[in-house]
Amino acid sequence: DGGITQSPKYLFRKEGQNVTLSCEQNLNHDAMYWYRQDPGQGLRLIYYSQIVNDFQKGDIAEGYSVSREKKESFPLTVTSAQKNPTAFYLCASQLGGGNQPQHFGDGTRLSIL
Amino acid sequence: QKEVEQNSGPLSVPEGAIASLNCTYSDRGSQSFFWYRQYSGKSPELIMFIYSNGDKEDGRFTAQLNKASQYVSLLIRDSQPSDSATYLCAAPSGNTPLVFGKGTRLSVIA
């Protein structure tokens, strides 16, 4: 059953701690994306990757880091430099070029302890 | 910066009515347009896409595209309370990722 799996569903971060959000897809999609969504707000692009071992910053990359070592996986690390990390984080993937739709995972909700 | 604009709403319609959601985009080169539905606390779900001028129908949903006016809309016929959600419009812009609008919140009143 093809899809995008994000884990965990809920995550709590302590002050000064780095946390990593997992995103795995078995759709054989080339491109993967990370978005942040705050309550009542739209999607904001954090990072994206169009091929393995390459990624680009989005609109709000500060305080976040990513890696793309495998086509299937695009983990996001929320570092201690991100002072306001509480949000809903969405991972998406896309087959090929920009004229294709993005498909989303179920999201991870991150809160500060 | 290429943009996709939507009225944030809320748009309230009575059950059984037609809900009309609108979206304008700035990049004349955009070739495809996507509508996503996002229920509160959930992730966006693709519900329609359209590539050509005119109308595309899928069940109770109709997407309409007018490239000359840079305007795309989503009509929901026979609106149901279960259609209450935020609807996001998205369009590609060159080699950059999809540009998403901020979404229109729809409330269908029983």
Image: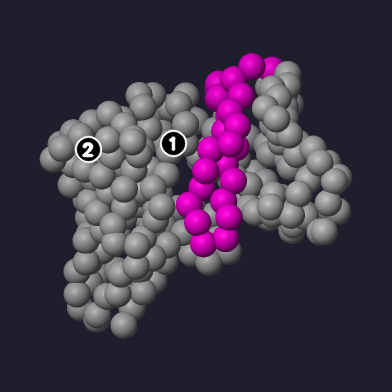
Q: Position of residue A83 (x, y in %)?
A: 32, 74
- Between the residue at mark 1 and the residue at mark 2, the CA separation in whole angstroms equals 15 Å
Badge number at residue A102: 1
Question: What amino acid type is highlighted by mark number 2?
Answer: Glu
The span picked out in magenta is: B29-53
Q: Residue at x 24, y 54 (%)?
A: A22
Q: In which quadrant of the rendered image does the C terminus of chain A lie?
A: bottom left
Q: Residue at x 27, y 29 (%)?
A: A28
Is A63 situated left or right of B82 in this image? left
Is residue A88 on the magenta stretch?
no
Name the quadrant containing residue B85.
bottom right
Q: Are marks 1 and 2 on the same chain?
A: yes
Tag 1 subunit:
A
Is A106 situated left or right of B10 in this image? left
Q: Residue at x 44, y 36 (%)?
A: A102
Rendered position, B39 above or below A74: below
B30 or B74, nearer to the observer:
B74
CB contact under 8 Å: marks 1 and 2: no
Residue B3 visible? The answer is no
Tag 2 subunit:
A
Question: What amino acid type is highlighted by mark number 1?
Answer: Gln
B100 or A30, nearer to the observer:
A30
Is residue B35 on the magenta stretch?
yes
Is A57 situated left or right of B99 in this image? left
**SS label for mark 2:** loop
The residue that mark 2 highlights is A72
